[in-house]
C-alpha cells in the first residue's frame, strides 16, 4: 500500500492470508442446469445488492447438481464477491442461506477468524480496495476478475479489538443510512404507483369526467377515426401515383385494389367507453414499421457513418434526442433500413428485463434496429400522437403479457398493429394530455429529488468506508494487541491444520512469491465524512 501510513498497531495482509487456506477463496457452479422451483438456492451477481444478499428471486438448482458442486456450498460466516460482469459487489452470507450455492460469477471467501467476515466485507466495499479490484479486471467481452489476483489483493488489518469497534461503528452508521434509503425507496415506489394511476385514469376517461360534462357537443371520436382512415387512403393513392411517375411505368390495372385497409377492432367483448369515445387499433392510427441491424463485419456500413441508428435501450428515456451509433448511406441503400422522421413513436419489441413494451419518441430523424417498432403518424392522425403515447405507457404491463414466445417472449409488428386503443374525441385528447403532463411534471420533480438524495446516501456510505480504511472512523487504543499477532495466530493455526491432515509438517512454499496487489490510499485524510467523496 504505497504511500499509506498505517495507524499504530495496523499492518497490511493479502486476502489469502486472512482465510482458512489456499482453497478458501473459490468460485461456484459453471453451468447452473435447469431451474428447480423447490431446489437449492444458487446465488448470482444480481442477488448481491448494496452489501447484502437479496434472494427474493434467486435461481434454484436440483439436489443432484448441488452435491456435484459442494465446493461452492455456503456455510455462513462467509463473504461473496462478484468476479464476472459487474465486478466488485460484496455481501455477507446470512444464516438462512447456509447450504446454498453460488454461480461461477461469484467468489466465496472463508475468513480464518470470526471477525474476519465483517472486516473483509467492509474493506472490499471501500473506494480504495474497489479501485484495486477494478485495476485487476481482465476480459475483452465481459469483465472478469482472476482468483489468483483476488487472493493477492492487500487490505489493511487493524488490531482485532479495533476491527470490532470499526465494524460496529460502520453498522451503526449504515443502519441509519439504510433507514433513510428505505424511506426514499418507499417514496419512489409510491410515485411509480401514482404515475401508473394517472395514466390509467387518463385512458379510461376518469381524468376528464368533469370536462366531458361541461362539453357535451364535442365531435365524436368515431368521426375523427373516419377522417384519419380516409386521409390515409388518399395519401397512399397519391404516393402510388408519384412513384409510378418517377419510374415512368404507369399505374397497373386494378392498382386501387392493392390498398391494405388497416385492421379494425375484432374483440366483441370490449368494455363500454365514455360518451363519444370509440375503439380503434394502432394499425388504424399509424403506419407501423421496424428496422434492422446492418452486418457488423462490413465496416463500410458503420465506419464514418452520419445517419443516427437507434437501438432498443433508447426507450428507457421518454424522448430520444441523440444516437450512440451511426450508419452510412451505403448501409441505408443495401439494407431494409428506413429513416423515420422526428416525432415517430418507438416501441421495444424484445429485450431482456423490463424494456420490452416500453414506448419512447424520436426527437431526431433516425433509423432503428429490428428490436423496435416505429409508429409513424402524419396529417390528422398526428394530432393523436401524444395521447397514443400515453395510452401505450398506461398499458405497458398488458402489452408485455401479450408478447408471444417461450423462454424469451417477444412482441412483433402484428401484435403492435392489433393493440386496441380507447380513442377520445380530439378536443378531449388535448385536455387529457395537458392534465397528464401537469401531474407527471410534479412526479418528475419529486423523483429527481429522491434520486439526488439516494446518490447523496451512496456518497456518505463511501465516505464512511473510506474513513474506516484509513483508521479515522474510531479512536485507536494503544493497549490493543497489534494486528501482526493476529496474523501470526492465523499462520500458526493453518500450519497446525496442515500438519494434522498430512501427518507431517506442512511443506515450505517454493518459488517466487506473487507480488501483492496493494490497495492505494486514494484520498487525503480528514476528520469528517465528506459526502463529495466518490468511489
Image (cartoon, rainbow, N blue to C red):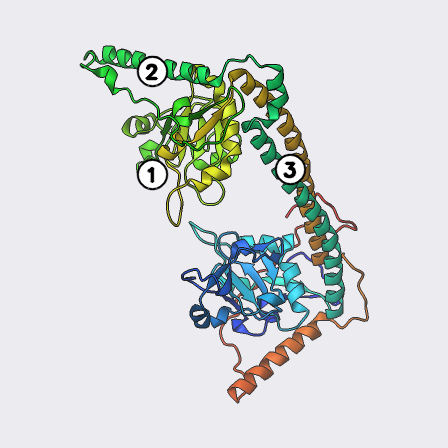
Among the two numbered marks 3 and 2 on one chain, the one whose residue lies closer to the N terminus: 3
Among the two numbered marks 1 and 3 on one chain, the one whose residue lies closer to the N terminus: 3
Which is nearer the eye, 376 or 209? 209
Q: CA distance from mark 2 to mark 1?
A: 38 Å
Q: CA distance from mark 1 to mark 3?
A: 41 Å
Which is nearer the eye, 92 or 123? 92
Label disc, if present, on residue 233 of the rendered structure: 2
Picture quarter with the N terminus: bottom right
Would you say 441 lies left or right of 351 here?
right
Tags 2 and 1 touching, CB below 8 Å: no
Among the two numbered marks 2 and 1 on one chain, the one whose residue lies closer to the N terminus: 2
**Within 10 Å of the Cα at label 3, are there few (<14), some (14-19), or many (20+) other Cα atoms?**
some
Q: Which residue is mark 3?
A: 191
Q: CA distance from mark 3 to mark 2?
A: 43 Å
Badge 3 marks a residue whose secondary structure is helix
Above or below, comparing residue 42 to residue 492 in the picture: above
**Within 10 Å of the Cα at label 1, are there few (<14), some (14-19), or many (20+) other Cα atoms?**
few
Q: Nearer the viewer, mark 3 or mark 2?
A: 2
Label disc, if present, on residue 403 of the rendered structure: none
Q: Which residue is mark 1?
A: 296
Residue 204 position, x and y percent, is: 55, 29
Would you say 290 lies left or right of 516 here?
left
Residue 378 position, x and y percent, is: 42, 17
The answer to whether residue 319 shows anywhere in this view is: no
**Within 10 Å of the Cα at label 2, are there few (<14), some (14-19), or many (20+) other Cα atoms?**
some
Residue 523 position, x and y percent, is: 69, 50
Amino acid at each position: 500500500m504505497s504511500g499509506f501510513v498505517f495507524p499504530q498497531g495496523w499492518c497490511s495482509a493479502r486476502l489469502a492470508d486472512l482465510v482458512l487456506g489456499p482453497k478458501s477463496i473459490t468460485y461456484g457452479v459453471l453451468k447452473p442446469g435447469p431451474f428447480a422451483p423447490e431446489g437449492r438456492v444458487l446465488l448470482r451477481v444480481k442477488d448481491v445488492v448494496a452489501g447484502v444478499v437479496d434472494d427474493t428471486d434467486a435461481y434454484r438448482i436440483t439436489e443432484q447438481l448441488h452435491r456435484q458442486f459442494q465446493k461452492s456450498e455456503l456455510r455462513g460466516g462467509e463473504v461473496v464477491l462478484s468476479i464476472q460482469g459487474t465486478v466488485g459487489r460484496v455481501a455477507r452470507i446470512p444464516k438462512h442461506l447456509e447450504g446454498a450455492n453460488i454461480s461461477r460469477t461469484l467468489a466465496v471467501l472463508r475468513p480464518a477468524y470470526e471477525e474476519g467476515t465483517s472486516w473483509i466485507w467492509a474493506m472490499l466495499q471501500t473506494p480504495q480496495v474497489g479501485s484495486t479490484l477494478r485495476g485487476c479486471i481482465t476480459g475483452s467481452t465481459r469483465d472478469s476478475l482472476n482468483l489468483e489476483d483476488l487472493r493477492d489483493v492487500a487490505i489493511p488489518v487493524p488490531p482485532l479489538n479495533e476491527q470490532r469497534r470499526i465494524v460496529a461503528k460502520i453498522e451503526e452508521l449504515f443502519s441509519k443510512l439504510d433507514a433513510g434509503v428505505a424511506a426514499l425507496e418507499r417514496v419512489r415506489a409510491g410515485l411509480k404507483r401514482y404515475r401508473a394511476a394517472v395514466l390509467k385514469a387518463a385512458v379510461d376517461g376518469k381524468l376528464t369526467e368533469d370536462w366531458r360534462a361541461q362539453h357535451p357537443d364535442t365531435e365524436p371520436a368515431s368521426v375523427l377515426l373516419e377522417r384519419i382512415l380516409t386521409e390515409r387512403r388518399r395519401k397512399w393513392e397519391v404516393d402510388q401515383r408519384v412513384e409510378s411517375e418517377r419510374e415512368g411505368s404507369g399505374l397497373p390495372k386494378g392498382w386501387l385494389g392493392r390498398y391494405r385497409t388497416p385492421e379494425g377492432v375484432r374483440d366483441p367483448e370490449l368494455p363500454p367507453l365514455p360518451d363519444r369515445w370509440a375503439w380503434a387499433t394502432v394499425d388504424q392510427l399509424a403506419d407501423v414499421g421496424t428496422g434492422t441491424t446492418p452486418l457488423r463485419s462490413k465496416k463500410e456500413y458503420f465506419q464514418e457513418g452520419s445517419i443516427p441508428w437507434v437501438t432498443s435501450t433508447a426507450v428507457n428515456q421518454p424522448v430520444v434526442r441523440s444516437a450512440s451509433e451511426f450508419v452510412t448511406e451505403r448501409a441505408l441503400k443495401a439494407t431494409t433500413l428506413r429513416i423515420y422522421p422526428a416525432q415517430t413513436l418507438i416501441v421495444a419489441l424484445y429485450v431482456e428485463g423490463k424494456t420490452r413494451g416500453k414506448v419512447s419518441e424520436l426527437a431526431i430523424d433516425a433509423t432503428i434496429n429490428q428490436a423496435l417498432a416505429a409508429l409513424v403518424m402524419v396529417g390528422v392522425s398526428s394530432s393523436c400522437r401524444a395521447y397514443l403515447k400515453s395510452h401505450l405507457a398506461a398499458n405497458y404491463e398488458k402489452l408485455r403479457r401479450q408478447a408471444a414466445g417461450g423462454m424469451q417472449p417477444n412482441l412483433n409488428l402484428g401484435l403492435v398493429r392489433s393493440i386496441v386503443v380507447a380513442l377520445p374525441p380530439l378536443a378531449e385528447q388535448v385536455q387529457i394530455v395537458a392534465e397528464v403532463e401537469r401531474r407527471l411534471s410534479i412526479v418528475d420533480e419529486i423523483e429527481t429529488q429522491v434520486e439526488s438524495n439516494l446518490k447523496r446516501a451512496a456518497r456518505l456510505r463511501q465516505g464512511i468506508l473510506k474513513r474506516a480504511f484509513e483508521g479515522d472512523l474510531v479512536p485507536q487504543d494503544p493497549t490493543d494487541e497489534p494486528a501482526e499477532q493476529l496474523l501470526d495466530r492465523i499462520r500458526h493455526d493453518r500450519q497446525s491444520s496442515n500438519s494434522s491432515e498430512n501427518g507431517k509438517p506442512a511443506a515450505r512454499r517454493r518459488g517466487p512469491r506473487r507480488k501483492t496487489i496493494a490497495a492505494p490510499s486514494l484520498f487525503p485524510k480528514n476528520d469528517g465524512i465528506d459526502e463529495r467523496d466518490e468511489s
